[in-house]
Amino acid sequence: MLCPLTADGYTYGLFDKLGCKGDRLYVIIIPHCLLQLFKSALRTAMTQANSITNEYQITVSSLVWQRVEQIAGEFNLSVYELLEQIGEGKLKVVAVPTNPAKLSYRDIANAFLWLAAQTNVAINVYKLQKLMYYAQAWYLGVYGKPLFDADFQAGIHGPVIPDLLEKYQCQFSWEPITENIEQPKLPQKVGQFIEEVAEAYFEYDDETLERMICSEKPWLEARGDLPRDESCHGIISQESMKKYYSGRFFSK
């Protein structure tokens, strides 16, 4: 199971201690401005622990309130239930390391290709596209933000980053990519995340990965009613990816 990574820089998140397995935390990233809201809820609940009702009032902007509602929805709770569970300690506010560096899709592609060379795994351009997709999808699902700066088109054979496809298709066609890649300089924990994705998906060939991805909601939604064998340049939305893979992650 993919788990949240740690990296340089910190933001704040929530984890459900009931869903914690070892050091693998069920995390939702929240902006720093909401930290005081959650801390206020926690302090108020603690000071009123002996009262009959735990009522409190906190003034926030509409944008902040919308974000609180969104976070509550991730846990299938109302805002009241969210704050109540924070106050009761069922949900805790914790510092969650995040990766502040902006990575390009080439950084991640090179990481997969370098790792494949070290582990003697054959990767052609189509398998590389799908590994990239799963890395982006799971990162969005777990952290609510993209791992790298590219969108995927919902191609016939699965998600496609056109520039990446063109780069290697012209040179290697369907054959394994044998380009000599130096180990990319990624934040340590991002490298660990890539290794987790590789561990989960390296064993599958590109056709198996295609069947997996093309049966999943984000790819299907992006294609709409198009026939399976018809070309498509529609973008697989990051919001769709985040919703689908966060649902799979938090249901484990």
Image (cartoon, rainbow, N blue to C red):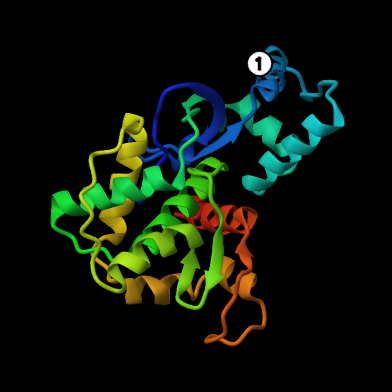
Let me know if residue 23 appears in the view: no
Mark 1: which amino acid? Met
- Residue 114 position, x and y percent, is 23, 47
In this rendering, is residue 187 above or below 108? above
- Left of 220 or right of it: where is 176? left
In the structure shown, which secondary structural element does the residue marked by tag 1 occupy?
Answer: helix
- Left of 118 or right of it: where is 24? right
Let me know if residue 155 appears in the view: yes
Residues 6 and 222: in front is 222
- Residue 80 position, x and y percent, is 76, 36
Q: Circle 1 sits on which residue?
A: 46
Which residue is pictured at 52% across the width and 73% down the height?
155
Residues 243 and 229: in front is 229
Q: Residues within 10 Å of mark 1 (few under 14, many from 20)?
A: some
- Left of 88 or right of it: where is 119? left
In this rendering, is residue 206 above or below 27? below
Which residue is pictured at 65% across the width and 21% down the height?
35
In this rendering, is residue 77 above or below 22? below
- Residue 245 position, x and y percent, is 52, 56
User: On the rendered image, what quadrant is the C terminus found in?
Assistant: bottom left
- Extreme residue toward the front, this view: 170
